Image (cartoon, rainbow, N blue to C red):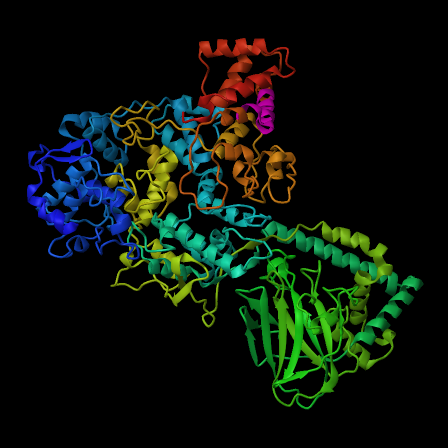
């Protein structure tokens, strides 16, 4: 078909019919301006051609590649897709202009034909030589010169421009024949600044003070004051949390709560401190890998722990860890490169030069981290807990002293103590901790700690086997083995188990325990455990379960997370191990259930028991019993230690320990958060390419690497997560400055300089102001004495000080219907959180506490009833009820209703830009949602108080209400209309609340001033 078409080439007419469109011969075109490849040609090719003739070799048709110059010039059998300078000899032109459905490209069944204007552009481009250019976003940026105004408009430009930003903006306006709008009035400016920089409305006295401040730098002084406010971190912290896919729950079906708010606090603090963006990035991606990493730097790595977690029992935990890594690659690509890296998960990217292997190379850079929990208690919490623990310990000592050791001690208690001690003495044995010579497991990494215990970490499955090779016993016959299940700070709920989903956190389930001497299996006997009520028939605690060859029964610790436990398994016959011998532990459940930390000991004593005493107390008691059989002759400190254990454990001491337990329960709960931790050098995690992106189709091993098209062969390439983080904010990544500056621009103007905030690839929309974007990006990255040194506050300051930002809101011109050139300040609705915070601040209800756990403002009960398990929504009380909106508890499967109505995020994915819809439900929410009615009532009451009480005139109250909501004074017509509405509602029990509610529902109340 191609050959026959080429034979017809000479017979093609000057006018080529395509459907109903007739195209003129390019030689007759009046437009002789050179065609810009990046601006005019690449978007056409990307839209129509790259899917079949782009980077993805798996789906590339006819071995033709049109995304590269070399591919477009390839010999296709005597002809080429593009013949530079000769459109008529170019197969591309022949195909896109054909009226034969079998030959025309794109194929008739997959895409509509190119428009006449697009074909004309392709023709002219080829006629000009068909030169390719590197996609603008991949070209290393340089600092552009600030444009000079045209001679015809020098005076006007000089009087309007306040900063280099304005020079770039007005240059584009002049090219389009447009001019900037007037400056907004001062009330609008102060209100705009407060809502944009702090996310709340300005107090009336601040508005009045700004209006009265006639100093030439009044505006700059206000900007600096707001940038220094702690509310700044809350405002921009919320924006960052969209990117971080922050949520207080795990997602998926069960969507249980998680503790991740310490990461949110870190973000707020970092924003307020104006942490340089490069450091801000590195600490979130790899803070744990920094030298002498601090607690806060480790907390920062919660950024990539915000991924969802499936807690269903039937899942493969490794599969869903893979999906978490998929999310991390996509998020990293969006945030620091502005690229849709996720498109290369299943195949080479169809539009951008990211290969399938590049994708997994990027994953490999981040894939060598474990995902533990970590204590993140704030200093005041630590201090309070220590104080309460000190009080409880003192009360314990005082109680046992009075009961058991004072001259007037309680004789009954003393007798009970002696009896209890005798029972404990009967349980004592001489145990020796054994250090394995070798440790293996099916998946987790086993690490020997200084105290002889073993810590498991890393990946785990629903069936893990630990194999421990023990040393010979030096001629001593072994009668029993003791397994201690121990806690550790890195484990879920402090352990002792690895269970982190489905089962109780920190639990484990030991299905079988076996001992081998070489190939010989050693017979074991049913033993004892420190867990109470471990009787035959109990499939979870009875010691005999580990010997029954039944994986569904075993030894575990129902409800005992965060505590130590012991299991003693006797050998059927004492045995001397003259050679290394093996202990095999099988953990099998429908969820991960391995031991997280444990220790193995052996004894030669007869009939050893599992004591309820902690091991350290056992050792003290055993040494004391060896020196004397009489308790009265034991050392005082040992007796006091035993007495405290008696008080804590003995049923007869229940009444005496109640006040102590109550005191301990009053201590603040420990805060544990989710972090990343790099695996040891000797235990790396392997990353493989997954065919079609499917978890079960793992192929060859892939080495850590950044995408090849961005790699600089002359410099060292990243090999781990820290080096990746450093590379992302280095000059070797041409995208990071542009992406970051564009995101900041969007936060103030509603749309970025690049409209597609999360996609700077070949499918993206071209920048409206490319030189301005590079100027902002380069100034932001400039770490010289005159640069901005990655300061986001400095970037934000430059934007809001510009004349561009200070323009009044106005309609978009017909020639620029989306107002991309910014001939006026863009009209837009504020996001969900700012709307609520604006009303909270206007009413005086807003709480000032910064940081801390999430809270639950009022919302309809039905919202959470649709979620799994129909969880309750216990509405917060006191000031928590009115905390800023970024502190609202975020449940992924049932987002807070009022925010969802205004396009708030669910936290399931990285969100580079929120949708901004306009629906009737939004108006109904502001009018009828109980939360907003409560705010309206408080607003009305506050306005009345401001005016001195109900004796004030309606005009005064209306004016105060109006200014609290909108900052400005009402016009006479507005005042009359509101007064008429109030008069019509006087039969209502709260007419001023209705007035406040109506004002809160004004378009002006929730949009750009």
What residue do we see at 59% from left, 19% from top? 993
Q: Is residue 701 left or right of residue 545?
A: left
Quadrant containing the C terminus in the rendered view = top left
Q: Quadrant of residue 374 in the image?
A: bottom right
* In magenta segment, residue 927: yes
Q: Position of residue 440 (x, y in %)?
A: 55, 75
Q: Is residue 118 left or right of residue 269?
A: left
Q: Is residue 593 visible?
A: yes
Q: Nearer the viewer, residue 764 or 680?
A: 764
| Residue 660 placement (x, y as % from top left) | 78, 54
Looking at the image, can residue 616 be seen?
no
Q: Which residues are magenta?
A: 926-941
- Residue lying at 63% horizontally and 17% vertically, measured from the top left: 990
Q: Is residue 773 above or below residue 687?
A: above
Above-or-below relation of 233 to 713: above
The quarter of the picture where residue 579 lies is bottom right
| Rendering coords of residue 728 (x, y %) | 35, 54
Number of numbered callouts drawn? 0
Q: Is residue 900 left or right of residue 507?
A: left
């Amino acid at each position: 078909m191609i050959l026959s078409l080429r034979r017809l080439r000479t017979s093609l007419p000057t006018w080529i019919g395509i459907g109903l469109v007739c195209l003129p011969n390019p030689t007759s075109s009046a437009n002789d301006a050179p065609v810009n490849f990046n601006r005019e040609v690449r978007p056409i090719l990307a839209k129509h051609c790259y899917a079949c003739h782009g980077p993805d070799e798996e789906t590339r048709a006819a071995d033709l590649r049109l995304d590269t110059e070399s591919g477009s010039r390839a010999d296709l059998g005597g002809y080429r897709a593009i013949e530079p300078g000769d459109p008529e000899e170019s197969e591309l032109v022949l195909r896109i202009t054909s009226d034969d459905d079998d030959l025309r490209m794109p194929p008739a069944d997959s895409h509509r034909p190119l428009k006449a204007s697009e074909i004309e552009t392709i023709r002219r481009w080829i006629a000009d030589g068909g030169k390719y250019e590197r996609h603008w976003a991949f070209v290393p940026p340089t600092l552009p010169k600030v444009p000079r105004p045209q001679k015809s408009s020098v005076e006007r430009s000089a009087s309007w421009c306040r900063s280099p930003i304005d020079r770039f903006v007005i240059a584009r306006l002049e090219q389009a024949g447009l001019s900037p709008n007037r400056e907004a009035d001062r009330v609008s400016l102060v209100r705009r600044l407060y809502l944009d920089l702090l996310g709340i409305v300005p107090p009336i006295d601040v508005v009045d003070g700004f209006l009265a401040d006639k100093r030439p730098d009044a505006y700059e002084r206000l900007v600096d004051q707001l940038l220094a406010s702690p509310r700044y971190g809350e405002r921009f912290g919320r924006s960052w949390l969209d990117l971080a896919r922050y949520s207080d729950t795990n997602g998926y079906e069960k969507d249980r709560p998680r503790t991740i708010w310490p990461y949110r606090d870190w973000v707020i603090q970092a924003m307020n401190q104006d942490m340089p963006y490069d450091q801000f990035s590195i600490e979130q991606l790899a803070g744990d890998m920094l030298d002498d990493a601090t607690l806060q730097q480790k907390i920062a790595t919660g950024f990539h722990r915000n991924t969802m977690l499936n807690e269903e029992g039937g899942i493969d935990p490794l599969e869903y860890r893979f999906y978490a890594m998929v999310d991390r690659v996509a998020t990293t690509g969006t945030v620091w490169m502005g690229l849709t890296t996720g498109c290369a998960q299943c195949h080479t990217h169809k539009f951008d030069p990211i290969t399938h292997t590049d994708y997994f190379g990027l994953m490999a850079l981040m894939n060598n981290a474990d995902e533990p929990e970590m204590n993140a208690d704030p200093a005041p919490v630590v201090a309070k807990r220590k104080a309460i623990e000190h009080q409880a310990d003192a009360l314990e000592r005082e109680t046992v002293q009075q009961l058991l050791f004072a001259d007037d001690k309680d004789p009954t208690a003393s007798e009970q103590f002696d009896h209890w001690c005798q029972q404990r003495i009967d349980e004592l044995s001489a145990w020796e901790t054994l250090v394995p010579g070798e440790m293996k497991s099916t998946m987790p990494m086993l690490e020997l700690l200084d105290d002889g215990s073993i810590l498991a970490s890393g990946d785990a499955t629903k069936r893990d086997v630990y194999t421990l090779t023990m040393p010979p016993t030096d001629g001593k016959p072994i009668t029993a083995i003791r397994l201690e299940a121990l806690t550790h700070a890195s484990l879920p709920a402090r352990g002792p188990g690895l269970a982190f989903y489905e089962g109780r956190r920190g639990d484990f389930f030991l299905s079988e325990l076996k001992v081998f001497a070489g190939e010989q299996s050693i017979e074991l006997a049913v033993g004892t455990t420190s867990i109470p009520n471990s009787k035959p028939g109990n499939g979870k605690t009875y010691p005999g379960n580990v010997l029954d060859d039944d994986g569904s029964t075993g030894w575990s610790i129902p409800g005992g997370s965060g505590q130590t436990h012991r299991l003693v398994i006797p050998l059927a016959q004492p045995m001397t191990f003259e050679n290394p011998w093996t202990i095999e532990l099988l953990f099998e459940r429908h969820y991960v259930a391995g031991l997280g930390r444990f220790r193995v000991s052996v004894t030669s004593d007869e009939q050893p028991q599992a004591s309820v005493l902690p091991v350290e107390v056992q050792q003290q008691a055993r040494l004391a019993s060896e020196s004397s059989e009489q308790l009265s002759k034991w050392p005082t400190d040992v007796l006091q230690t035993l007495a405290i254990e008696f008080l804590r454990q003995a049923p007869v001491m229940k009444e005496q320990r109640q006040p102590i337990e109550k005191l301990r329960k009053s201590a603040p709960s420990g805060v544990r958060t989710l972090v990343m931790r790099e695996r040891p050098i000797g235990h790396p995690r392997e990353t493989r390419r997954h065919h079609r992106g499917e978890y079960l189709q793992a192929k060859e091993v892939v080495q850590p690497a950044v995408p090849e098209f961005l790699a600089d062969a002359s410099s060292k390439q990243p090999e781990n997560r820290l080096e990746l983080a450093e590379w992302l904010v280095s000059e070797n990544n041409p995208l990071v400055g542009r992406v970051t500056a564009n995101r900041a621009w969007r936060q103030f103007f509603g749309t970025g300089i690049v409209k597609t905030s999360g996609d700077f690839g070949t499918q993206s929309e071209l920048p409206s102001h490319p030189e301005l974007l590079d100027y902002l990006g380069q100034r932001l990255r400039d770490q010289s004495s005159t640069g901005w040194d990655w300061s986001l506050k400095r970037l934000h300051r430059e934007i809001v000080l510009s004349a561009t930002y200070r323009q009044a809101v106005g309609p978009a011109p017909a020639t620029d219907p989306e107002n991309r050139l910014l001939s006026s300040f863009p009209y837009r609705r504020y996001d969900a959180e700012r709307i609520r915070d604006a009303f909270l601040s206007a009413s005086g209800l807003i709480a000032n506490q910064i940081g801390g756990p999430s809270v639950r403002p009022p919302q309809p009960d039905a919202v959470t009833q649709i979620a799994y398990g129909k969880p309750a929504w216990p509405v917060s009380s006191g000031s928590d009820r009115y905390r800023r909106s970024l502190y609202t508890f975020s449940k992924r499967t049932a987002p807070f209703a009022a925010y969802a109505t205004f396009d708030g995020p669910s936290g399931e994915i990285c969100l580079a830009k929120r949708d901004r819809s306009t629906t009737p439900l939004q108006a109904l929410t502001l009018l009828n949602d109980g939360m907003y009615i409560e705010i309206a009532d408080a607003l009305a009451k506050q306005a009345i108080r401001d005016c001195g009480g109900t004796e004030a005139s309606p005009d005064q109250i209306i004016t105060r209400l109006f200014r609290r909501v909108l900052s400005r004074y009402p016009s006479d017509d507005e005042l009359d209309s509101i007064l008429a509405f109030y008069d019509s509602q006087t039969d209502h029990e709260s007419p001023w609340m209705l007035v406040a509610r109506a004002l809160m529902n004004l378009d002006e109340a929730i949009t750009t001033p």
